[in-house]
Every structure is written in structure tokens, then in C-alpha cells.
Image: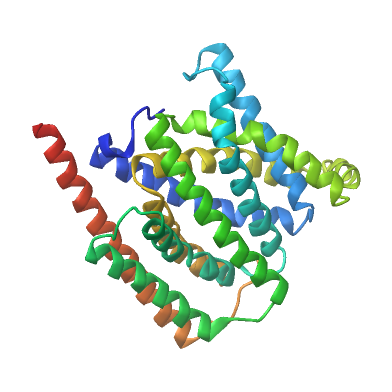
């Protein structure tokens, strides 16, 4: 499944499917990453394994004719290098924060991304969003703050890394949106370039930080456990699925839509996070904040869907 056109030509149904797919994959990935990091603390080595699996799968699919796509182009690779760097920086800081931050609070911090994307769009001259969209984003951010007041267990390192991850996620989503619209790249092509360009950078990082070669020896010793292998394989597979759905959602919708979908899936992840993999105590402010956050997310989703539907009708008349 590829998307060869920009966001403006996507049908409302495709936009909805892309958003829902990304939401489900993103929610599953948080729990899978948290589960494996509880057993295997080498987050950067885990990331390079995910990117290597993605690269090999797409290359194999292209060679066998199972997937379509343009061949490797050095000019395109140079243009997408910043996307790859910001993407890996985001995931690296996110994985590092997950080692010390529980899932509900991790998600609460990451929900600040839509507001950051909205501000970034205004600063880069994209123009002010419709009033309904702006109010919905502010509503989701307000919900985050209310929930945070009732449940933040202060962890300076963990929360600092999560906030840095928000900055990097905002940057690469804006770059992905721009690349998909201007260069006509499909989600699979963006995945391939992103994963391939990530490998040298990640290899340098695991060597520079001292993860390698100890991380491989630990991985080898843990590989005898069937339970660990199952979680590892799930992590690699879901890494591929998450990347594909994320790029697809950003291309056919927008960077802001992708972040709002992340907010909506975060409601389910937060609820489950209270009970799975180390839950936290429920407070009245948490519930109030999540309700406000959910209202804002649903509000935005409806406004954006209607906007997309109107745009599609106008385009079909031309």
C-alpha cells in the first residue's frame, strides 16, 4: 500500500484509515517497547535492530516485486537526511525516557506535541489554522496540564528526555509532511530512506556510548528465553508497522493530524498504563484532565475530517 500523491488528493476514507492505523500501531508500540526495555535496557541497540529489520524487509519486497517504489537516489537521500536524524533523535530520547517514566506520565508529556506542531506551522509561514482546530489543540493541551498536576512523580532525567523527544518529534513530522507533499514520495519510500540513513548514525551512537559490544552479548544470552524472543520479534515487526502508518498518516493528512491521533490513542494507553507494566494511583485531576483531553481530540478529529471532506468535494468538481 503506497501513497504517491500529496495530502490534498487523499480521500476522506483513506485519511481516516491512515489515522486509525497509526493510532492502533502507536498504542501497541508503547507497551511493547516498555515490556522489552524492562528486560533489555539497551535502547539504542534495540532501535538499530528495528531500523535494520525495516531496511531489509523493504529491500526484499522491492527485489521480489512485492512492493513498488523508486530506486535509491542520492539527491533524495540528502534531502531526507534531516528527517532521519530528527526521527532517530526522537525515538532515542523517547526510549530512554520510558526506562524511568511510567506509561501514563510518558504519554502525558508526549501529548504536548500537537501544540508544538501547531506553533511550528505558524512560525514557518503555513498560516493560522481554522479556529475550531486551534481551540481543539488548546483543549487537548489543557487536559494534559490538568492531568499532570494530579499525577506527576518527578523524575528530572526521564521527563527531560521526554520533553526533548517532543521537540524532535515536532521537527521530523513537519519535515515528513513537507517531503511527502513536495517530492511525491510514498510512505514506503520515506520508510526506506529513513531506515537506511539511520543505520550509520545509530551504529556510531552505540559504539560511542559504549553499548556495543556488550549489548550484543546480553542479547545473545537472553535469546535462549522464548518469552524474550517473542517480545523482541514483536518489537521489530511493530517498529515496521508503526513507521509505515506514521508516514502514511502524515502524508495523506498532516503533521498536526498525526500528533492528534497520538493524543487520542494516548487516552487508551494511559488507562491501560494504570494497570499494566507498573500502574500508578488514579487521582481526580487525572480523570478530569483525560476527559478534557479526549474532548479536545474528538473535537479536532471531527473538525479536520469535515475540512478534508469539503476540500475533496471542491477538488472533485474542478
Q: Quadrant of the N terminus?
A: top left
- Residue 110 in the image: state x and y as whole percent: 53, 64
Residue at 15%, 46% in the rendered image: 310
Is 286 placed above or below 183 here?
Answer: below
Is 75 placed above or below 63 here?
Answer: below
Residue at 86%, 42% in the rendered image: 216
- Residue 60 in the image: state x and y as whole percent: 61, 19
Q: Quadrant of the C terminus?
A: top left
Is 183 placed above or below 218 here?
Answer: above
Give left or right: position of 129 versus 240: left
- Residue 214 in the image: state x and y as whole percent: 91, 47
Give left or right: position of 199 versus 18: right
Residue at 22%, 47% in the rendered image: 308
- Can the viewer see residue 294? yes
Is 212 placed above or below 10 here?
Answer: below
- Residue 95 in the image: state x and y as whole percent: 67, 56
Amino acid at each position: 500500500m503506497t501513497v504517491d500523491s500529496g495530502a490534498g488528493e487523499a480521500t476522506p476514507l483513506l485519511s481516516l484509515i491512515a489515522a486509525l492505523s497509526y493510532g492502533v500501531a502507536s498504542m501497541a508500540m508503547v507497551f511493547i517497547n516498555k515490556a522489552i526495555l524492562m528486560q533489555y535496557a539497551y535502547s539504542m541497540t534495540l532501535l538499530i535492530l528495528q531500523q535494520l529489520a525495516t531496511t531489509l524487509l523493504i529491500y526484499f519486497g522491492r527485489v521480489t516485486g512485492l512492493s513498488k517504489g523508486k530506486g535509491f537516489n542520492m539527491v533524495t537521500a540528502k534531502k531526507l537526511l534531516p528527517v532521519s536524524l530528527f526521527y532517530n533523535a526522537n525515538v532515542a530520547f523517547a526510549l530512554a525516557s520510558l526506562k524511568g517514566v511510567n506509561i501514563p506520565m510518558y504519554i502525558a508529556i508526549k501529548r504536548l506535541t500537537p501544540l508544538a506542531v501547531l506553533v511550528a506551522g505558524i512560525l514557518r509561514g503555513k498560516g493560522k489554522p481554522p479556529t475550531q482546530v486551534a481551540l481543539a489543540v488548546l483543549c487537548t493541551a489543557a487536559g494534559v496540564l490538568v492531568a499532570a498536576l494530579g499525577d506527576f512523580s518527578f523524575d528530572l532525567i526521564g521527563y527531560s528526555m521526554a520533553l526533548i523527544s517532543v521537540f524532535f518529534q515536532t521537527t521530523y513530522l513537519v519535515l515528513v509532511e513537507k517531503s511527502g507533499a513536495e517530492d511525491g514520495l510514498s510512505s514506503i519510500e520515506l520508510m526506506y530512506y529513513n531506515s537506511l540513513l539511520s543505520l550509520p548514525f545509530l551504529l556510531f551512537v552505540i559504539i560511542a556510548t559504549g553499548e556495543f559490544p556488550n549489548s550484543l552479548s546480553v542479547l545473545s544470552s537472553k535469546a535462549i528465553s522464548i518469552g524474550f524472543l517473542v517480545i523482541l520479534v514483536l518489537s521489530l515487526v511493530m517498529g515496521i508497522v508503526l513507521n509505515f502508518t506514521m508516514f502514511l498518516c502524515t502524508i495523506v493528512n498532516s503533521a498536526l493530524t498525526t500528533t492528534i491521533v497520538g493524543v487520542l490513542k494516548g487516552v487508551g494507553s494511559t488507562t491501560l498504563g494504570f494497570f499494566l507494566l507498573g500502574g500508578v494511583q488514579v487521582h481526580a485531576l487525572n480523570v478530569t484532565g483525560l476527559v478534557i483531553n479526549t474532548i479536545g481530540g474528538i473535537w479536532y478529529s471531527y473538525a479536520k475530517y469535515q475540512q478534508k471532506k469539503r476540500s475533496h468535494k471542491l477538488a472533485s468538481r474542478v
